[in-house]
Image (tube, rainbow, N blue to C red):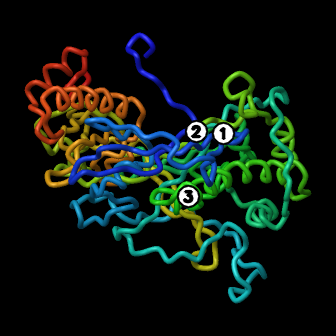
Amino acid sequence: MKDSGIEVLYDHRLGGITMDGKAIRAISLDHAPVDATGCPMSIPKKKGAITITAKVFIDCSYEGDLLAMSGTSYTWGRESREQYGESLAGVRPNLWLYEIDPYKEEGNPESGLITHVKDWKIGQEGSADKLTMGYCFRYKFNRKGEGIDIPKPRNYDPTEFELFRRAMRDGVDIYSSRSFNRLGQHERDTYKPKGAAKLRPYIFGTNLNRALMTHTIYGCNVDYPDGDWATRAKVWKFHQDFLVNFMHFLRTDPVVPKELKEQAEKLRFERGDFDETGGWPHQLYVREARRMISGYVVTQYDMEAKTKPKNTVGLASYGVDDWSYATIVQDGKVALQGGEFSILYLDGGNQNGSYAIPYEAIVPKKGECTNLLVPVCCSASHIAMTSIRMEPVWMILGESAGVAAAIAVADEIAVQNVPYDELRSKILELSQKLDVLPPAK
């Protein structure tokens, strides 16, 4: 980037914008460095620290703040089945229903719920809501007792983990993962030593687990997608605090099985990747936040090879991959809501899992912002975004957005009016693939 004369600004985030009609004329950046663990600040150190003017802007963020501030249409959460005719859309069946009493006084609903269990009313299957699949940190763990110590808690409250205490006390399997890799067929991954008949307690891995035993609480991120940075910082910090306190619980509580306690005692952050933030990853894994609503919305039909969109600017090739949305009370038990799809391909091998994303899905619809491209929070249904959300796809769309922005600047035209033939030619010169892949032989 030095060779291209590009200056990278660190420790700043979007604070506001200046519009001229339907065009963004300038953005204002707040100075907001992260804390020692990499967590964003709730309140910036200096608002409006830098103003940047440009002819075209590209919003490549997870959150889509520039998208939202520009007045461009967007949404978040799960659409209903009816909105785009997607059979997999909307509320899905519970992933798990655990035999765990959710009430403070066991058997007494009037006593209230134990920590981390919500009384959210989930709609009927296929209905829309504003829940978002679980986030997490992609930790780098050392399981040999070497590396960076996970911090000790500052305000440990043992009642926070009553949910897990009851599960372990009663021998409830909260470790097994359950998912759909094929429609109608549940896959179940259990953690058993070879030849063993009994399930082995297992501490979580670097990614989430499609089960209660993992390093977050499903549903804790509900306010993140459309929240301000104070809200997001709380969600971010919750993930950090939960791991710290949960590790203390697993290491010290008498109810924890011996094998699990031994695993927890050895768990550390690996050295080498995130040393400057004490082992904490630099980025919360925001699997999905806002999604633009544009002239073309990528949907389940695209993934099923039932569409042939024009003006392709990139290919995706990944199955439906979602995670649970909430930890709730149901029928006097604890349920994990939704999240069963795990790299579920829908095209039957017709296009080797690949599908096209058109230019119209990364620019606002006509009549909205004229100089903005959105390759990350692009125009897609929730079901489609569970697949699009892979970093290689976003990199492809980001490259195509950059080419389109250059054309729009050079020709002094709105991004919606970039001539596709010219755009396609320049993208192909960069060795992109724009035609869906044939079936594997």
Residue nearest the observer in this picture, 42 or 273: 42
Pointer 1 and pointer 3: residues touching (CB < 8 Å)? no
Residue labelled with disc 2 = 283
Q: Secondary structure at mark 3?
A: loop
Separation of disc 3 and disc 2 at Cα? 15 Å
Residue labelled with disc 1 = 38
Separation of disc 1 and disc 2 at Cα? 8 Å
Q: Earlier in the sequence, mark 3 or mark 2?
A: 3
**Quarter of the image where the C terminus is located:** top left
Residue 271 horizontal/vertical position (percent): 75, 24
Query: Label 1 is placed on what type of residue?
Result: Gly
Pointer 3 and pointer 2: residues touching (CB < 8 Å)? no
Identify the residue at horizontal 9%, vertical 32% (top origin).
Answer: 419
Separation of disc 1 and disc 3 at Cα? 18 Å
Q: Nearer the viewer, mark 1 or mark 3?
A: 1
Pointer 1 and pointer 2: residues touching (CB < 8 Å)? yes
